[in-house]
Image: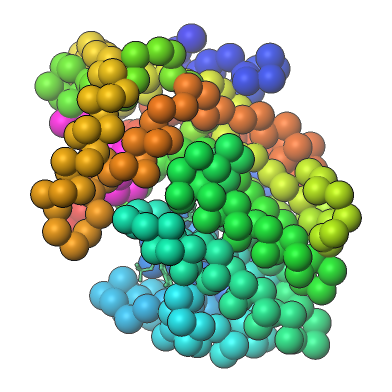
Amino acid sequence: MTDGHDLGAGVSGRRYPVMDGSGRRCPVTGVTGTRYLVTGATGFVGRRLTSMILARGGTVTALARPSPRARALRELGVQVVPGDLATGRGVEEAVRGADRVIHLAATLRARTAAGFRAVNRDGVERLVRALAAQRRPARLVLCSSLAAGPAISLYGASKRAGEQVAREHAGRVPAVILRPGIVYGPGEEALLPALLPMVRLGVVVQAGCGPRRFGMVYVDDLCTALLAAAERGPVLRPAPSPVSCLGLYPISDGNAYDMADICRALARAAGCRTPLVLPLPMPAVHAMAALAELVTRGAVPALNRDKAREMGRADWTCTPDDAVRELGFAPATTLTRGFEAALAALRTAP
Ligand SMILES: NC(=O)c1ccc[n+]([C@@H]2O[C@H](COP(=O)([O-])OP(=O)(O)OC[C@H]3O[C@@H](n4cnc5c(N)ncnc54)[C@H](OP(=O)(O)O)[C@@H]3O)[C@@H](O)[C@H]2O)c1
């Protein structure tokens, strides 16, 4: 793997010249004056997306559960509709008057299949039904995940079930699905907090002994792809037409990173030496995940049995060629620059 401004070989053999933030990004058009409904606006991706829309002259309605983060959105000028996708509260009110809907809300950690499905499948259904009831349903961008492809985890299976719901209603509600790989950047609360202490220590434990490859995308690059998908490109074919890839976009910066690449970039951003990567056999990872769940009451730990299922898979890469061609997607941020921005945000966090 090369270094600096052009990291890594493209997954599809093609190279993606990832620029340094100042480079081209997906052209973001059509935002000014557009009324977006954003679900999950209080989350990591949602907060960046909301800021981006507001900065470009669009308006945002957020369907959000009551929280300090929801209150902070109001202070930015977002219209917050109190609601909950797990119950359907607020959904009908939130979709009213929206020109575009970007659906980010999701359960990323749960102990049971039902815990994931309540939002990741049933929440999509509630949203899509509310849209279908509108006179002219707004275009929907569903943020799914690469995990929905193989669906080897409960999370992945629930995201795939959410995709299926969108397909079932595609005759009435125009919809596009994005499947990002690992999303990183300022405000991210899983990868960086886990990796940074190990990188600083000089030793990083990798789940599994064989090779591992990951597709990654900087959060702002994903946001530009979401906004582009809200404006252009083909939509899903309605079921029961044969499952096609139209309107379905895997998203990464186009490179395949192994753990050493990721750690090297993070170490460079953090100003420390490149750490040693030590593989941990998967049975030990599964045991640690089960133990972590056992000793953690309430919240689901970052290392959990469902995450361990995903960690067993060697290849989590994708090629974003369709998004490049049809949406004008152009990833603009290298891993090192992206990690630098994430670390800077950590330093200034309250
Ligand atoms: N982060 C990644 O690496 C990654 C990778 C691939 C795909 N994705 C997808 O990208 C999207 C955004 O992920 P993220 O990292 O931003 O997640 P996140 O930080 O955990 O945010 C999740 C959002 O969903 C909201 N939410 C959860 N349950 C809800 C409910 N019942 N009703 C209404 N809102 C609810 C949360 O609201 P509260 O503030 O009330 O909890 C929060 O705003 C998700 O669809 C995820 O599957 C993420």
Would residue 202 appear left or right of 43 to someone viewing this image? left
Could you say where residue 130 lies in the image, as x and y percent from the top left?
65, 83
Res 137 visible: yes
- Pinpoint residue 161: horizontal percent, then vertical percent: 60, 57
Residue 250, quarter of the rendered image: top right
- Image location (x, y in percent) of residue 30: 72, 63
Residue 297 part of the magenta segment = no
Please tell me whether the stretch drawn in magenta is mainly helix, strand or loop.
Answer: helix
Total marks drawn? 0
Q: Residue at x 48, y 9 (%)?
A: 1
Q: Is residue 196 found inside the magenta-colored segment of the image?
A: yes
**Residue 53 appears in the figure:** no
- Nearer to me, 280 or 52: 280
Which residue occupies 59% across, 88% down? 92
The residue lying at 65 percent from left, 57 percent from top is 163
Task: Name which residue lies at 43% across and 13% down.
Answer: 211
Give the image location of residue 218, x and y in percent: 48, 39
Residue range (magenta)? 188-197
When the figure is inspected, residue 35 is found, relative to residue 139, above or below; the finding is: below
Query: Taking 133 as reference, is 276 left or right?
Result: left
**Residue ranking furthest to the right:** 241
Where the C terminus falls, by quadrant? bottom left
Q: Is residue 128 above or below residue 271?
A: below
Location of residue 89 with respect to 108 vertically, above or below: below
